[in-house]
Image (tube, rainbow, N blue to C red):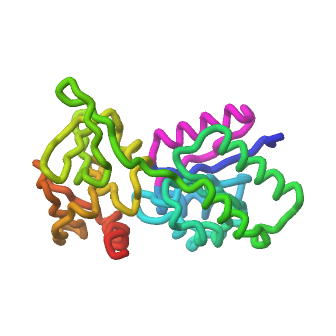
Amino acid sequence: MIPNLRIILIEDEAATARNLEFILKEINPDIEVVATLQSIAESVDYLSACNHDYDLIFSDIRLSDGLSFEIFRQTSIKKPVIFVTAYSDYALEAFRNNGIDYVLKPFDKEEIQRTLLKYNTIIAADIKLEQTKTSALLQQLQSARKNYKKSFLIHYCGRLIPVESAKISWFYTANEIVYACTADGQKYTIEFTLEQLERELNPELFFRANRQFIVNRNAIDTIEYFFNGRLLIKIHPSPDEQVIVSKAKAMMFRKWLDQ
């Protein structure tokens, strides 16, 4: 049975945070989300002042201003953390930061219920966080490793056209319509949001540059320094708008490219 819990959510995607809170309430209506935090700075301020008046943290890893691990370096967190993310490449560091489990997006009710039962078992058995076995968690992570979207079936001029994900240079959204542009310059509209695409695409190949663009690593020609610590990406085929990476994401983008 899942106990009544006071939970903090650290998540910068409002839709994902709402979905997670809805699932938690479905599992146990008496679960209380005491705070939803969207950035490292906001989380550090809140957790430094809240006097540990909560039971559990659900935390995304990639936030708008960096990796959430920085929160746990700057604050004294004694409570367990469940990391919820689309990326599996931070598993070991997650477990070093009070992590007791690692859930890959997109998640469902069964997955969240399973991880809450695991939390319950650890607390009931009075197992110290530092004694949890990372090997079992890593094995679970490997078995749940996401199969990223390899192609899109696109409606175009009364036909259905299969387009390989790897051949799409960039995705762009405007006026709630998402466009995909291939390496040969063909542009299609697709029935996905950028948030959905960010979860479905291989993060080793695609990067969410800003609110409007997701770019393919192989489409990047050059990167130029822009105003206020931002970066200007030159990609092919060239879109009508400039592709600018914010100062908050610039370091993460450079690390992503330098792999």
Residue furthest bottom as drawn: 258
Residue at 69 percent across and 63 percent down: it is 137
Q: Looking at the image, is 204 positioned above or below residue 198?
A: below
Residue at 44 percent across and 51 percent down: it is 148
Residue 17 counted in the magenta span: yes
Is residue 176 something one can see in this rendering?
A: no
> Quarter-wise, where is residue 25 in the image?
top right
**Observer-nearest of 32 and 235:** 235
Q: On the rendered structure, is 211 left or right of 12?
A: left
Q: Looking at the image, is 164 positioned above or below residue 160?
A: below
Residue 5 position, x and y percent, is 75, 45
Residue 80 counted in the magenta span: no
Residue at 65 percent across and 54 percent down: it is 57
**Observer-nearest of 54 and 9:** 9
**Observer-nearest of 236 and 147:** 147
> Quarter-wise, where is residue 49 in the image?
bottom right
Instruction: Give the magenta part as a residue range.
Output: 13-38
